Image: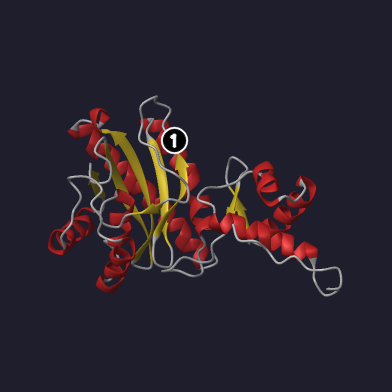
Amino acid sequence: MKKFYAPDKEDRYFSRAVSNALQILDLLRNDQSPLGLSEIARKTGINKTSVFRFLYTMEVTGHVARDETGRYTISHTGLECSPDITPEQVKAAALPRMRRLRSSYAETVSLGVLLKNHIEVIQVLESSHLIRMSNRIGAIIPPHASSIGKAITAFQDEDKQEQLVNSFGMLRLTEKTILDDVTLKQEYSKIRRLGWSHDNRESAMEGQCFGVPIMLRGKAVASISISFPVFRVLEEKNLQSMLENLKRTANEVSAELDSDSQGT
């Protein structure tokens, strides 16, 4: 973390409180995962009582957000496709339904959103199985290899698709990762036709993942996914049932966000 300006005693215009608040924001902006109160106090050197007051104020004003474990992250502004909808609103609409999916399938359920030039995980409910596919809040998602990334990118215009892919880079993550433009465009077309995406060992050789887009005004603003170890993927009949359930869940979230965006 960068060092903050330390004023001399003659600088009567300097606000130590504002400097401390900015230091906390800088820490949250640069850290790769949500942080708890004690960890923020330790890393900044600010006492816990003051850290709590700064965090409380910034949460009320919308500058930081708290996850279900009580840890803090930067609060994003509106989504790229829909500036009147925030990631926090998407998470609030999705989380109860994500819990329902995890309860039904006992596998890891993740939520990602489209931000300025990347797709980012904002919520993860981990599987209770000892062997499971994991995800991480704050992770940047590959638009060409992950189910969340492909589900969101498929429902953008071609310029936006190209921006997202170029921003992340068409990197080889496994031997099954799609690495050419023609195949990737065909994959996006298939996703638009089916309404769901499949990461078939493209981002991790030991896992498969299925994702569906959350739509608002004709474009995907987010996606919900379910991830399985390859040895535990459902048989065809049960898999189709799960995909229909996943699509219904995303449609419910989409409808709630549409209602929120219209102020009804």
Where residue 4 sits, quadrant-wise, is bottom right
In the depicted view, which residue is nearer to us: 207 or 215? 207
**Residue 74 in view:** no
Q: Position of residue 159 (x, y in %)?
A: 28, 74
Q: Mark 1 packing: few (<14 Cα in 10 Å), some, or many (20+)?
A: some
Residue 234 seen in render: yes
User: Circle 1 sits on which residue?
Assistant: 126
Horizontally, residue 100 falls left or right of residue 75, namely left
Measuring from the top left, give residue 144's x and y in whole percent. Answer: 25, 56
Q: Is residue 31 above or below residue 221?
A: above
Q: Nearer the viewer, residue 30 or 4?
A: 4
In the image, 99: left or right of 230?
right
What number of labels is visible? 1
Quadrant of the image containing the N terminus: bottom right
Residue 147, image x and y in percent? 29, 49
Q: Quadrant of the C terminus?
A: bottom right
Residue depicted at x 29% and y 42%? 209
**What is the residue that sits farthest to the top in this orientation?**
130
**What kind of element bears circle 1?**
loop
The residue drawn where x is 58% and y is 53% is: 73
Q: Position of residue 216 (x, y in %)?
A: 39, 64
Q: Residue at x 18, y 59 (%)?
A: 184
Display coloring: secondary structure
- Residue 253 sits above or below residue 207 on the image: below
* Residue 128 horizontal side relative to residue 208, left or right: right
50 or 92: nearer the viewer? 50
Residue type (three-letter) at the residue carrying disc 1:
Glu
- State whether residue 242 is above or below residue 33: above
